Amino acid sequence: MADSFDTTLGGADRRFPDTTWQIVTRLHATGDAEYRAGMELLCRRYWKPIYTWVRIACARSNEDAKDLTQAFLLWLVGGDALRRYVPEKGSFRGYIKLLLKRFVQDQADAMNALKRGGGVKVVPLESLEEFEPDPRAADPEKAFDRAWAVGIAKDAVERVRERFKARGREIQFRAYEAYDLSPPAEKPTYAKIAEQLRIGESDVRNHLFTVRREIQEEIRAEIARTVGNPSELEEEWNALFGS
Amino acid sequence: MPSSGREGWFDGLKDGLGELGRAPRYEKREKLGEGGAAVVWRAWDRELERPVALKFLRDFPKELPDVRLRFEREARVMAGLSHRNIVTLHDVAEIDGQLCLVMELVEGPPMSNLIGLHKYPMRRLVELLAQAADGVAAGHAKGIVHRDLKPANVLVTLGGEPKVGDFGLAYVSEGGTRLTESGIVLGTPVYMAPEQATGESRSFDARTDVYALGAILYEIATGRPPHVGETMQEIFASILNTDPPMPRRLNASVPRDVETIALKALEKDPSKRYANAAEFRNDLRRFLDGQPILARPPGAAARVARWLKRHRTLSAVAGLLLAGLCVALLGAWIRKRGFEREVEGTLARAKEASDSGDHAKARDLYAKVKSLVPGHPIAERMFGETDRLVQKAKQKKEAQALVEEGRLARAEWERLKSEHGRTVMRARDLAAALKPYEKGEARQEFWDCERRIEALAKDIAAQEGRETAAFTKALGLDPENVEALRGMAAFYFEMYCRSDERRNDREMRIFEDLLRIYDDGTYAARIFRTGRVRIGSSPPGAEAFLFRYEEGRDRRLMPRPCASTGQIRVPGDETAAGTTVTLECSDFNFLGTCPSSEKILPAGSYLLLLRKTGLRDTRLPFRVVGGQRHELDVRLHSEEEIGAGFIHVPAGRFAEGGDPDAYLSAAWNEEAQTGDFFLARYEVTCDEYREFVESLAAQNLRDAFPHLPRDRERSLWGIGQNGRVKYGPDIVGNQPVLGVSWNSAVAYCEWRTGRARSRGEAVTFRLPRSSEWEKAARGADGRIYPWGNHFTWCFTKGGLSRNAKPWPEPVGSFPEDESPYGVRDLAGSVAEWCEDACDLQPELRYCRGGAWLSADWVPFRAASRAAEDPANAAVSYGFRVVRVPDPK
């Protein structure tokens, strides 16, 4: 048991965040430990989109939203709904959304599930302070999708960052980070970045191109693993990252 | 991850991906050259993934749409032209709002750079020209005329193959600015055929190119173009009216056939030239193969006739004056010969100097030719080139001198550093050997050491400044300078190591980033961000839960649950003053069962919680050092062994002393060790101590008196005739006992041991040793206070902790005053007696921690030690005990 945990919790040697596909594979794994570890990763990764949706779509207060999210995740952990997920039938995102909607139809049940959970905490990846959805936002679906996309993008960025680092091309990634990952209002100029990194301005442009392409590939590959066919890939891509 | 909250970065990322769809096809990489008319870049074609050259045309009148349309249309026709001696034009594109030609990338110099170089014999140049003519001929075969052939347009690949560039694009400049006065920008029109120079005829044909080829051949042979002049007008006039000097008169070694071919190609009347480039090439080939050429040299008579034809009116007068002029002309001719010889000689010497690498001399010689023949094309061009080389060499030399300076500073730095290290060691040794009260020679030497250390520190800082200034300046002059880069990298690595020693993680990250700007990977490979940890327990089978210490909002170091990757965090950060640390154990921070496999953890400070049924949960703070392997082995004990109210501090390494701001801090020792010990969670309270006093009083009242708590001579407690203790005013039973001397504390331990043994418990009580006390307070990460590295009165019981007159409070009143092991009130409340004698003065005993009435916060630093008389009792002294079960 101890050893299986070593690997399933990401293991000591894990360098990149797991992909959704790895999580899904684990959910299909027969061993309980495997399943549990997959669930943990899943909770970590999808806590936010679920919380966002719940907060906007059906919860009155922040505390309620947290409890309901908690309840839903516990329900997922406890039941076997996820084992029944078949990529050919649609995107993983859609499936989770579907489960979530069904789940909150009966909130009383939902809260009971929470109580049965015995106070076990499901811990999200990041502090809530950084991310507080606006409950007045009109569309819970959109907010869900955005949070979902943020999760995928974040992990993709991390993986690409590691890769550039491993190749000794960190400077390219730093140019990218400085420009693309700044919020639009605070974007530095190419000249500023060039000056900071001591490279040419055209280098900045080229680095941006190179890293963006890798990020795009990384994200698309990630999405591709959770959809059934290429046209769905395009659909998912546009839904999540189209402007 | 991006710093900004609310996921602003995600919008940036999305925008970036949107940009991607609009990213240009061509990626500029480096500037290859810059001329008057164009800038050429090496670039990468992202679509076809091949290298290309981009030629941006300057001053292209893009505001004239028809010119541009024609340009693009014709360029696309040219694009179909494919020949091994022609630079293929791939595409016309608009990049950054500028029109540019996308061409095959040719790595090699233009022929203009080769003409006039000694290592390039004339025959080889003629051979190149013949091949170039082959390319031109291929164009002619398709009806495409080049119109702007010149040596600068013929690139020679590194394989020695010429490629004609800019085929058929001359009209671009015609539509543009060539015919304006700023023609200099576009270079010289010296390769222009007369029919081009008049600007009248627009029906150029292949023979126009033949003229240019002839002009190039002429330059190959003589080192100068056929027509020169100071101004454009002079050159045009010469092209239209004058025959070029016979090549063999300028350079006697020119083969007669070459002269003949060149002059035929340079005929002013197109019909007398070769009909096209193919014919020109064939004659060159014949010459190269040693066969007779087809062209015939013009006879002297033919030349006179030609002259007369052009200057009919003048010829009559000329005839009359001819005889008279003969004498004058002869003199002029002789002077001219002398002048020409001087020019040729200077040029030859300049070439020689240039070839032997003496660019400065070459530059001066070219400058001389320039002054003799203003506008001399070779001199002009070569002067510019050699001047550039001279400047560049000068900069490199300056950079090298700076590097030298930097290196000297570095050497000096190293010398100072090593002396500094030695002096510090010496001072330390002296200090250790010196009795605190000693004066004399040894003390004087110690003072000298201290002064020397200060002076050295100043000099070291100065050398660091000198070194970085020199390297930075060198990089300004020569950004590629390897030694300067390496020097800067070495410097920042040094700074990185220094902040590592000081355990300043923030500084470490800063210097690592700076290092990476200069590092070629040498130093990056030496920076380890993770260490390896293996955890064992005895008995085996304990479950390990992992927490990582992070600074909370109240600046305390808080153990946060984390997975083996150190990435999971609890939502929010709700720690605030007044909260205790609760350790949440869940699947998320479950590390495994001991003995665990080897874990890789990011460097930093951690807390491990070990749990096994039937045994007490044990906390083990530890620090992961990047690149190191740590073996942790924890012995777990049962509740009975440890005892209620006691805390197990596991055996092992901790960082002791080394706090320059503490009182009497021990020397820094990262390898300090203690064995397992069980330390009372709180200090001994009044109620506990009261039992001791009353038990003594029950035997004999007089025995109890010496141990009654007192402040110097004033008793704080009273004792009745019945042997019952009476507390002083405002003293409550769960306060720490205060006013106890070391002797009384030791007596208490003995009494308590006796009482326990009489109850059948096989244990001994004693005072903690000074190092045990410090370990219990600081954990493994060398923190300054039990809770972290920042002091606040509201975390601990001290003189300024309440808005009231200081008074002792019950033990445990300040939950923040808790050490990594869970021991409370170590920093404040009362100063605590330790068992061991002061190593500087064995008559004194160590007493540690701050006290409830102290407004001085230094004693609260966990490395602070006070040395006191064991017989002294004062209101600030109390104690806690260690419980030692008998070995089984």
Image (cartoon, coloured by chain):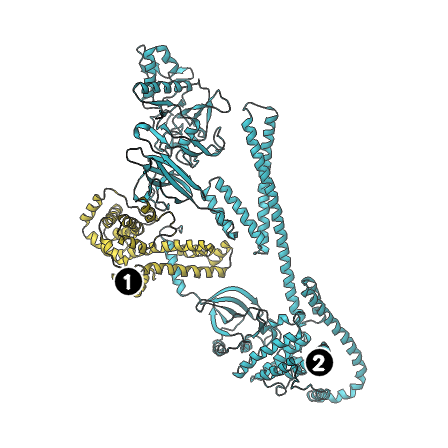
Chain colours: A yellow, B cyan
Asked if badge 1 and badge 2 are on a common chain, one would say: no
Q: Is residue B21 above or below residue B402?
A: below
List the residue tagged with mark 2: B246
Q: Taking A75 as reference, is B837 left or right?
A: right
Q: Residue at x 32, y 34 (%)?
A: B617
Q: Is residue B666 visible?
A: yes
Q: Taking B67 as reference, is B705 left or right?
A: left
Q: Secondary structure at mark 2?
A: loop
Residue B362, percent across and down?
69, 65
Q: Taking B38 as reference, is B25 left or right?
A: left
Q: Residue at x 49, y 60 (%)?
A: A203
Nearer the observer, B130 or B864:
B130
- Quadrant in the picture for residue B537: top left
- Quadrant in the picture for residue B451: top right
Name the front one of labels 1 and 2: 1
Q: Residue at x 50, y 44 (%)?
A: B496
Q: Is residue B325 above or below residue B339?
A: below
Q: Is residue A187 visible?
A: no
Looking at the rendered structure, the kind of residue marked 1 is Gly
Label 2 resides on the chain identified as B
Q: Is residue B753 above or below residue B357?
A: above
Residue B578, percent across and down?
33, 34
Looking at the rendered structure, the kind of residue marked 2 is Met
The span from disc 1 to disc 2 (Cα, nearest Å) is: 81 Å
Nearer the observer, A40 or A154:
A40
List the residue tagged with mark 1: A228
Residue B782, percent across and down?
44, 35
Label 2 packing within 10 angstroms: few (<14), some (14-19), many (20+): some
Label 1 resides on the chain identified as A
